[in-house]
Amino acid sequence: MTKVGKLFILFALAGIVASCGGPQGDKTQAGEAQEVSVKSGDVTLNVDLGASNVEWVGAKPTGQHNGTINLSSGQLMLTEGVIVGGKFTIDMNSIVVLDLTDAEENGKLLGHLKSADFFEVETYPTAIFEITSVEAVSGNPQASHNITGNLTMKDVTKSITFPALVTIADDGVTASSPAFLIDRTQWNVQYGSKTLFAELKDKFINDEISLKINLKAGL
């Protein structure tokens, strides 16, 4: 085999490993819920529901799926042009799968995600994220702030921190995060967990879910 041929195989194998390695992003640790100290600000902005959502990616050894979840309500609070708080309701019934074009396969996966195996949306139709602190950062072109808040999902509340690129203007605020990872098992989403069910061997589903936040809010 020629040197070029060997290099091609190495690059191909590297691509396969990368594609099966799970969702991409920095992992955020889930900690104990924190006290929400700010109840209001000088200015309250309402979330633009049509321009805001959460992008998700889940994976297993044979591949991955991706989609979006919408917000059903949300407010962002500012004092003297600085974000001091916010609370957002995530509509778990709005979850969609984007990568499966076959209607039957798409519906089957969507039904499974909504079932008690995963997000149990009939019992827990919403998730809540409430900001507890916002810290300005520098040196990261993808982020101007670190946002810390309590994420409540399936009646479990944990504190998480993720970076976001935030723009504050006279007409409102836009914010977007690079992809980051949470461990779904911390919120009792345990189906197919590699960590909890070792007997699954290579039939597991990654514990980590990749999330990307897209937010727009205005008066």
Image (tube, rainbow, N blue to C red):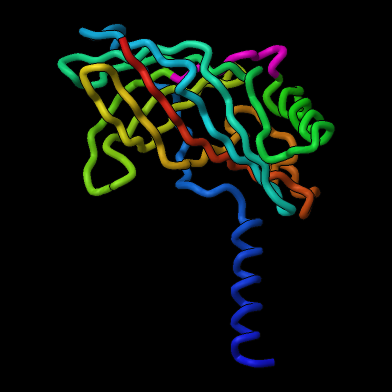
Residue at the image point whose x is 49% and y is 26% from the top: 158
Q: Position of residue 148 (x, y in %)?
A: 36, 28
Observer-nearest residue: 183 or 104? 104
Residue at the image point whose x is 69% and y is 92% from the top: 1
Q: Position of residue 33 (x, y in %)?
A: 44, 22
Residue 108, image quadrant: top right
Residue at the image point whose x is 18% and y is 19% from the top: 81
| 127 drawn magenta | yes
| 119 drawn magenta | no
- Quarter of the C terminus within the rendering: top left
Residue 196 falls left or right of residue 139: right
Spot the residue most to the right: 104
Q: Position of residue 205 (x, y in %)?
A: 71, 44
Residue 101 in view of the camera:
yes
Spot the residue most to the bottom: 2
Spot the residue most to the left: 80
Residue 167 falls left or right of residue 193: left
- Which residues lie in the magenta part? 121-129
